[in-house]
Image (tube, rainbow, N blue to C red):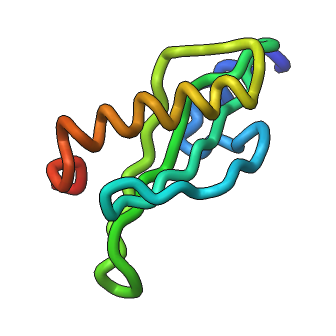
């Protein structure tokens, strides 16, 4: 039964962040890195938010990139997220 539990966790839509990192503002977007612990590594993941109240838009993203350190993964997350915002901007919410 442990095998199926691991498979289910791997493909689960809800992922639990390994460590909580502060939210950073970038060009009107709010980035919250959420490195996910996975097999002794940390996967690059984040939430991007823009707006407030009912106008709040949110985009969650998980990449295949991994790193052995949660803090370095959060730094990598911010870098990749800023590039993503520069390329896609509000298009991520469509």
Q: Quadrant of the N terminus?
A: top right
Percent of width and height locating residue 39: 77, 13
Percent of width and height locating residue 63: 46, 24
Q: Is residue 58 above or below residue 21?
A: below
The residue sitting at 46% across, 59% down in the picture is 25
Percent of width and height locating residue 68: 75, 13
- Residue that protrudes farthest toward the bottom in the picture: 53
The residue sitting at 23% across, 56% down in the picture is 93
Percent of width and height locating residue 76: 55, 25
- The reply to whether residue 73 is in sight is yes
The residue sitting at 40% across, 86% down in the picture is 53
Asked which quadrant contains residue 90, the reply is bottom left
- The reply to whether residue 8 is in sight is no
The residue sitting at 44% across, 47% down in the picture is 60
Name the foreground residue: 93 vs 71.
71
Asked which quadrant contains residue 86, the reply is top left
Q: Quadrant of the C terminus?
A: bottom left
- Drawn side of residue 47 relative to residue 3, left or right: left
């Amino acid at each position: 039964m442990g095998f199926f539990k691991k498979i289910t966790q791997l493909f689960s839509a809800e992922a639990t962040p390994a460590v909580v990192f502060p939210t950073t503002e970038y060009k009107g977007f709010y980035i919250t890195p959420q490195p996910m612990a996975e097999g002794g590594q940390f996967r690059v993941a984040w939430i991007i938010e823009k707006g407030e109240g009912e106008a709040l838009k949110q985009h969650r993203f998980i990449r295949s990139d991994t790193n052995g350190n949660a803090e370095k993964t959060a730094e990598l997350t911010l870098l990749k997220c800023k590039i993503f915002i520069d390329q896609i901007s509000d298009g991520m919410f469509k």
